[in-house]
């Protein structure tokens, strides 16, 4: 498949913009969100719910209320900035007068039972305005209907509560869905997550990132790997192409591997030669890939040539040697 | 492509046909588009109820949430670890496990609340693995509402690696090159201040340093290489500060940061080494009798970042980021070597060599991204994102090498000098990506999504070509990907997620890059009963590059099944089990050396992984608990391996706040091709856990 003609790309973008404009014409900014089928089914004569205040909620939900006192969201109860002073419960659950009257769970909004996108919009009415969520739009969680409440238990405190903070708790929470990834950490060569020395969020931002796989960024938007492996960052006089162009995963399996140094191949020689197999540069191979075959003095039958990094030890980049020897 | 275009046009049209939405209850005064209540949907997965490892299960069970009236609560876990002795390769054991014996502080956790909130409202402190363990960590969060939020994190990680088969896959015992025994220490501290409602200034500091010893090689052209001891030392400091400006409808962050870096690696040797090539050349044996090599690398960088998010309208969010940095590296390198060396181009033997290197690398780095999420209709979301990332590296190293027949001290017998200056050549990597996704809620239970991604770029680097003076290597990247998927909440207790991505590339950088690939993933979660849940994952990636001389065919599969059973709220028994079956199959043509004959590189990995944890309440012992479980990994293929980590743990309360813990864990590792890499050992722990 080739790059589509620019007209088609404009058509795509145009379709999106037309749809947005159409929506904009229908809904004025600030208009209430559309209703769901359940609400539509309510009798038209039902009196709109009004705010009753958190103290009313406390009457029945005392356990939640007490825990909430020490929850970071309690700020909503007291801080005018959020516009819900004394109404923290209803900031997320919506006006509660009908529910208070009927004591029926169906009469109040339950974010945990909304669609993921709808639940997220409640949280993001405040939290979108925070740097953590800049990459959220690109986040695979957001695109795969994993809502905020899938990981954050809003009412709870402590372990596994609002925010899992201990590495073991974070890893357990992520592994609950990513069981296949967690299995990789049972391999012998691995980052030390099962030992609790690291957590998933050391490398991934579950809220989203501008890098693939929700990879964390450090400093000047560089891959999060460099936070610990600063000596691989450079800039180098002689960059090794795949480090910059495809990142660490071009050669490493960061979650775990059966191969030493978490490499993607059992022997370094094969790992290198699978790329370094083009006959000449810059007259590239038929499909334009980089990586030339080594000079023929590299007699692969001899042990001293079977691990390329024995000599080409600065394989992540060199300051002084174009062949990455020193 | 046509399908995607049609999808994007049809989906909005369908959305138009939805009946007009009747008025809704009043939204909160300042709230954004509050989504209305929907018919009963499956509750979000109770992730907190899941148990992934025995360790974490223990940690969770032993750390109840603090009560509302407690000002201090915490625990300390300490004891002693014995090892029965490591049978097999001690180097491999240290490379994989590296636990030692002796008195240990396994864990310390406490939360302190100041009821008067003088200095802080709450302080959380936790530390694990102290007392010589390879992974020592400490973390503190201290916060005071509306005043500050401070976090501190410290990690001291032992990084030992000396895998015999890695250095030399062809010889038992292997060479001893490429090993190291270092400590990496990482410290992070961050302070957010809350002087007002909307402006949040912040300061952050990161320090990361590695130091220790290792064995590297000193390479004398293509003739020989010598294993020499080296001292490794590098450190990176990052300072950054800025301000978050937060309002209900928009957020802006302005940040200025800087990085310093230094690398002081040194290698030296004064013994006579014959190197890996012991064959005489022209009747002479090559040797290294003395070496002094030192790196003095200094780097610094200042960057500026602007980042914003905006909730422009109830149906429209936009975000963007721009960052510019210009890291620079100053290079100072020197080495003096003595021995019997050969210059293969002139067939001259010489006895000493001196190399001096200086230079500067300047790498402007610009990155920016922009995106929006639009909800033009109730059921439809359109997400567009674009990003660019551009590194341009102007490197100007100058390397002067002198060969002499005598010693440099006497300055006699100078044979040759060479200057290799590559200034003026540039390296660059430009990466660009554009992606558009559309998500459509067909019903409250079904969400479809589809999209398209285009990535393109170009690059040039100096390494990768033969010789010091060849032209740079260049490459291009152009790839189109189609994306689709489905989320189906079939029942209140069942969720199914399907994702597919297929791509075709016009240009790729490397023979093994993603070219024409298909990636699929299926995930299902079923809450069979309140106490029993099942989850299944399936993932497949197929990548093909049929170009002549490449013939790359790659396929990986991963199937995982997990079960969690917690009857009676896990008071008497709970069971967690996971099984994963993964396969990797890769074939690619390459050229073998020295005759450049064509061959196929085959890599296979067929792995079984299992993890389990069974928690049992001990009869007649209140709160006594027995945990049995652990993990196993067995693989066949190119690197057939076995790694077993079974464990048993017992916890018996001996006092209201004190429990006695004992644990046994076995570590067994073996490789079929490299038997000398195997090891096995038993670790026993006994200790006390005191809670408050």
Image (cartoon, coloured by chain):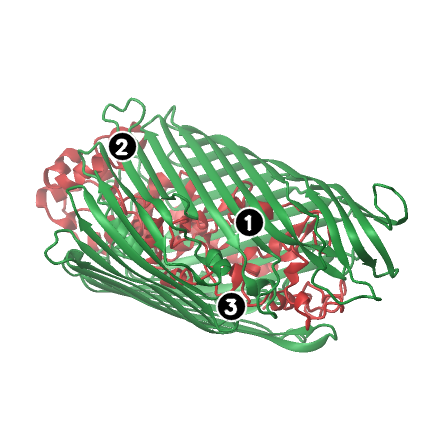
- Tell me residue A17's x, y (percent): 48, 51
Chain that the image shows in green:
B
Q: Are the residues tagged 1 and 3 within 8 Å (C-beta)?
A: no
Q: CA distance from mark 1 to mark 3?
A: 49 Å
* Residue occupied by mark 2: B112
- The verdict on a common chain for dots 3 and 2 is yes
Say which of B274 and B253 sits in front: B274
Chain that the image shows in red:
A
Q: CA distance from mark 3 to mark 2?
A: 51 Å
Query: Label 2 lies in what chain?
Result: B
Closer to the chain start, of discs 2 and 1, is 2
Question: Can I make out residue A2 in this image?
Answer: no
Q: Nearer the viewer, mark 3 or mark 2?
A: 3
* Residue occupied by mark 3: B676
Residue at the spot 21% in from the left edge and 52% down from the top edge: B651
Closer to the chain start, of discs 3 and 2, is 2
- The verdict on a common chain for dots 2 and 1 is yes
The crowd level at tag 2 (other Cα within 10 Å; few <14, some 14-19, many 20+) is: some
The crowd level at tag 3 (other Cα within 10 Å; few <14, some 14-19, many 20+) is: some
């Amino acid at each position: 498949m080739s790059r589509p003609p620019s007209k088609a790309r404009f058509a795509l973008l145009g379709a999106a913009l037309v749809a947005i404009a159409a929506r904009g014409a229908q809904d004025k900014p600030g208009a209430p969100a559309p209703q769901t089928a359940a609400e539509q089914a309510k009798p038209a004569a039902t009196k709109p719910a009004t705010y009753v205040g958190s103290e009313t909620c406390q009457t029945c939900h005392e356990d939640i209320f007490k825990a909430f006192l020490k929850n970071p969201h309690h700020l909503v109860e007291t801080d005018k900035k959020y516009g819900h002073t004394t109404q923290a419960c209803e900031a997320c659950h919506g006006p509660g007068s009908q529910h208070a009257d009927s004591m029926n769970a169906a009469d109040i909004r339950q974010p945990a039972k909304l669609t993921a996108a709808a639940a997220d919009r409640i949280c993001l009415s405040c939290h979108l305005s925070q740097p953590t969520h800049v990459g959220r739009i690109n986040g695979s969680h957001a695109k795969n209907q994993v809502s905020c409440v899938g990981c954050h238990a809003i009412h709870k405190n402590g372990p596994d509560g609002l925010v899992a903070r201990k590495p073991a708790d974070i890893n357990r929470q992520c592994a609950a869905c990513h069981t296949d990834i967690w299995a990789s950490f049972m391999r012998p060569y691995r980052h030390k997550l099962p030992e609790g020395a690291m957590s998933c969020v050391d490398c991934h931002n579950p809220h989203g990132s501008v890098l693939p796989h929700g990879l964390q960024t450090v400093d000047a938007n560089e891959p999060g790997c460099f936070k610990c492996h600063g000596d691989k960052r450079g800039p180098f006089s002689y960059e090794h192409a795949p480090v910059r162009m495809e990142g660490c995963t071009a050669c490493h399996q960061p979650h775990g591997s059966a191969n030493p140094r978490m490499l993607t191949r059992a022997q370094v020689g094969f790992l290198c030669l699978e790329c370094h197999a083009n006959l000449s540069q810059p007259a590239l191979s038929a499909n334009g890939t980089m990586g030339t075959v080594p000079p023929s003095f590299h007699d692969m039958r001899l042990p001293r040539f079977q691990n390329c990094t024995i000599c080409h030890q600065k394989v992540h980049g060199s300051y002084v040697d174009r062949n990455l020897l020193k | 492509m046509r399908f995607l275009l049609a999808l994007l046009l049809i989906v909005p049209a369908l959305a138009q046909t939805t009946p007009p939405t009747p008025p809704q209850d009043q939204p909160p005064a300042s709230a954004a588009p509050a989504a209305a209540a929907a018919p009963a949907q499956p509750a979000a997965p109770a992730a907190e109820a899941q148990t992934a490892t025995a360790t974490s299960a223990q940690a969770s069970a032993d750390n109840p949430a603090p009560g509302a009236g407690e000002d201090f609560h915490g625990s300390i876990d300490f004891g002693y670890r014995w090892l029965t002795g490591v049978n097999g390769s001690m180097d491999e054991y240290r490379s994989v496990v590296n636990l030692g014996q002796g008195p240990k502080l396994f864990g310390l956790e406490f939360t302190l609340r100041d009821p008067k909130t003088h200095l802080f409202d709450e302080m959380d402190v936790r530390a694990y693995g102290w007392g010589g363990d390879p992974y020592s960590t400490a973390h503190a969060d201290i916060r005071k509402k509306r005043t500050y939020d401070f976090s501190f994190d410290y990690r001291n990680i032992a990084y030992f690696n000396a895998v015999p088969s890695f250095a030399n896959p062809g010889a038992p015992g292997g060479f001893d090159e490429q090993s190291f025994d270092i400590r990496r220490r990482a410290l992070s501290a961050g302070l957010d201040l809350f002087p007002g409602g909307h402006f949040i200034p912040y300061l952050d500091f990161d320090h990361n340093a590695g130091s220790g010893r290792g064995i590297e090689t000193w390479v004398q052209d293509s003739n020989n290489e010598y294993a020499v001891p080296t001292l490794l030392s590098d450190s990176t400091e990052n300072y950054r500060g800025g301000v978050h400006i937060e309002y209900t409808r928009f957020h802006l962050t302005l940040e200025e940061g800087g990085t310093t870096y230094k690398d002081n690696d040194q290698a030296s040797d004064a013994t006579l080494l014959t190197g890996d090539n012991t064959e005489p050349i022209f009747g002479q044996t090559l040797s290294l009798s003395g070496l002094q090599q030192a790196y003095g690398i200094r780097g610094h960088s200042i960057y500026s970042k602007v980042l914003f998010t905006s909730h422009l309208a109830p149906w429209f969010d936009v975000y963007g980021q721009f960052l510019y940095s210009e890291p620079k590296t100053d290079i100072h390198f020197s080495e003096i070597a003595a021995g019997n060396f050969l210059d293969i181009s002139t067939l001259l033997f010489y006895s000493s060599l001196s190399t001096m290197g200086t230079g500067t690398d300047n790498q402007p780095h610009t990155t920016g991204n922009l995106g929006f999420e639009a909800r033009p209709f109730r059921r439809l979301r359109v997400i567009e994102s674009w990003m660019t990332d551009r590194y341009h590296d102007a490197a100007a190293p100058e390397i002067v090498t002198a060969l002499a027949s005598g010693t440099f001290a006497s300055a006699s017998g100078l044979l040759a000098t060479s200057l290799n200056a590559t200034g003026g050549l540039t390296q660059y990597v430009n990466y660009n990506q554009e992606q558009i996704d559309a998500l459509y809620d067909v019903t409250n239970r079904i969400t479809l999504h589809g999209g398209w991604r285009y990535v393109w770029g170009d690059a040039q680097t100096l390494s990768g070509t033969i010789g010091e003076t060849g032209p740079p290597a260049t490459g291009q990247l152009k790839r189109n990907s189609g994306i689709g998927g489905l989320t189906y909440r079939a029942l209140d207790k069942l969720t199914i997620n399907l994702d597919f991505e297929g791509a075709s590339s016009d240009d790729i950088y490397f023979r093994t890059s993603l070219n024409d690939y298909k990636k699929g993933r299926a995930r299902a979660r079923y809450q069979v009963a309140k106490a029993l849940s099942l989850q299944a994952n399936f993932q497949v990636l197929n990548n093909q590059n049929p170009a002549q001389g490449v013939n790359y065919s790659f396929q990986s599969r991963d199937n995982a099944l997990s079960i969690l059973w917690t009857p009676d709220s896990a008071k008497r028994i709970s069971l967690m089990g996971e099984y994963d079956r993964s396969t990797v199959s890769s074939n690619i043509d390459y050229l073998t050396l020295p005759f450049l004959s064509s061959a196929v590189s085959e890599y296979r990995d067929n792995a079984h992984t299992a993890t389990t944890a069974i928690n049992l309440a001990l009869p007649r012992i209140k709160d006594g608990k027995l945990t049995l479980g652990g993990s196993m990994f067995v693989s066949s293929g190119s690197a057939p391996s076995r790694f077993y980590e079974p464990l048993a743990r017992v916890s018996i309360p001996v006092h209201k706040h004190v429990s006695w813990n004992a644990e046994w864990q076995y570590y067994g590792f073996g490789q079929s091709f490299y038997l000398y890499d195997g090891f096995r050992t038993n670790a026993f722990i006994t200790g006390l856990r005191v809670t408050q």
